[in-house]
Amino acid sequence: MLARRAGNARHTSGYGRATILAAMLNAVAILIGVVVVAWEAAQRFQTVVEVPGLTILLVALAGISVNTASAVLFVRSQRHDLNARGAYLHLAADAAASGAVVLAAAGILLPAGTGPIRRSPSPFPS
């Protein structure tokens, strides 16, 4: 790792600041992503689009599978390592969130007017 390199004539303190720069670049990338998502959300309010319920359902099922399988890898080590415990809990929470998305996708796939919530085909009257 770059941050663990020892100092030299040019970088007398070593490369420890590389992790700070990496975190800053990560934050900038996340902020750019937030702006893009916010822009797309604003566009969706202006133009009604069909929600692909089946695609959402399939991706959420894949998310449950991947996150559960990854969490299982941390079951043994999470008892003795705090970082592994954090990763385990994060993956378990992601799997649970994907379960909630499966339920939402199932609701999307129900025909209009069926199920526990009565809804019109479009939230925006024409």
Image (cartoon, rainbow, N blue to C red):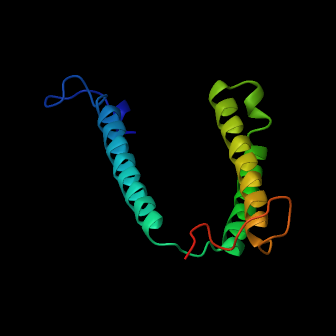
Seen from the viewer's position, the closer of residues 14 and 82 is 82
Percent x, y of residue 13: 23, 22
**From this viewpoint, is residue 120 visible?**
yes
Please, is residue 109 above or below residue 70 in the view?
A: below
Seen from the viewer's position, the closer of residues 57 and 26 is 57
Task: From the viewer's perspective, tell me whether residue 93 is left or right of residue 3.
Answer: right
Seen from the viewer's position, the closer of residues 28 and 80 is 28
Q: Residue furthest left?
A: 10
Q: How many marks?
A: 0
Residue depicted at x 28% and y 30%: 17
Percent x, y of residue 59: 68, 66
Residue depicted at x 37% and y 44%: 26
Please, is residue 38 above or below residue 52 in the view?
A: above
Q: Quadrant of residue 20?
A: top left
Quadrant of the snapshot with the N terminus: top left
Percent x, y of residue 121: 68, 74
Task: From the viewer's perspective, tell me whether residue 8 is left or right of residue 56.
Answer: left
Q: Residue furthest front?
A: 126
Residue depicted at x 79% and y 63%: 118
Q: Quadrant of residue 16?
A: top left
**From this viewpoint, is residue 69 visible?**
no
Q: Residue furthest right?
A: 115
Please, is residue 123 above or below residue 84 in the view?
A: below
Quadrant of the snapshot with the C terminus: bottom right
